[in-house]
Amino acid sequence: MTTRTFNARRGRLSEQRLGALARFGPEFGVTVGAGPIDPVVLYGRRAPLVLEIGSGMGDATAELAAADPERDYLAVEVHTAGVADLLALAARLRLRNLRVAQGDAIALLTDQLGPASLAAVHVFFPDPWPKARHHKRRLIEPDRVSLLASRLAPGGALHCATDAAGYADHMLATLSACAELRNRYPGFAPRPDWRPVTMYERRALAAGRTITDLSFERLSTVDVAGP
């Protein structure tokens, strides 16, 4: 059995969110497990593709897509309320460069996105799974990092952020150990101006937690192979 990196919360959806799923899902939604994704078919053009894993309620993702019209964004989120809210935002803002998938990001990466198909991957505030017996569920683990790296084009960026100090150290060590990735900084990265402050991040800052960013890039085939 595959170890899941998330817990799917169950809850009753409002009529507004149910309406957003029904109304905007056909235009802006992507079905996890529906077969390989062809970005040209999905977006109607060929452009660099950014995968956002865990888009939450979608505010930051919509802001990123709106500010970056030359690239296409694919957000994947397991929680239905967040998917519904982001679909509604995409429709209201007419974000033609944004699509939203509900489900397991690992399944999406494994079965629907090909090698070297992504210009960037964003992993903002993933579940740190703080209990030791749950560490295997963390998204930033060696086998999953190898999968992420394989889907990045050479020079493609993997940007992570967390408010969990222990997980930040684990992320740095795990990402640094991946032969296909290079750290863009000597250690942790400065907070980039382009990354919007998420609702979760605001709560973390209000609680006095430190936010840590990490920025890695995919090496070229020559770099990986060595001289």
Image (cartoon, grey):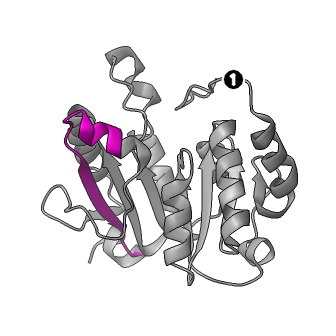
Give the labeled residue for mark 1.
Answer: 11
Q: Residue at x 54, y 44 (%)?
A: 56
Q: Residue at x 19, y 42 (%)?
A: 210
Label 1 crowd (10 A; few <14 / some 14-19 / many >=20): few
Q: Is 203 in front, or is 116?
A: 203
Q: Image quadrant of residue 127?
A: top left
Q: Give how far across and how far down residue 34 sits, in percent.
A: 83, 51
* Place of residue 114 in the rendered image (x, y in percent of width and height, measured from the top left): 64, 64
- The quadrant in which the C terminus is found is bottom left
Q: Inspect the image, locate mark 1, and give the three-letter code of the amino acid beneath it.
A: Gly
Q: Is residue 204 magenta?
A: yes
- The front one of 122 and 152 is 122
Q: For the magenta stretch, what is the residue range?
A: 202-220
The quarter of the displayed image where residue 166 is located = top left
Figure check: 185 above or below 209 = below
Question: 74 or 64, which lies in front?
Answer: 64
Q: Is residue 69 left or right of residue 126?
A: right
Question: Does residue 186 appear left or right of residue 81 in this picture?
Answer: left
Q: Where does the image place residue 73, in percent across and percent down from the top left? A: 59, 67
Residue at coordinates 34% horizontally, 17% vertically from top-left? 131
Q: Position of residue 149 (x, y in %)?
A: 45, 59
Q: Is residue 152 magenta?
A: no
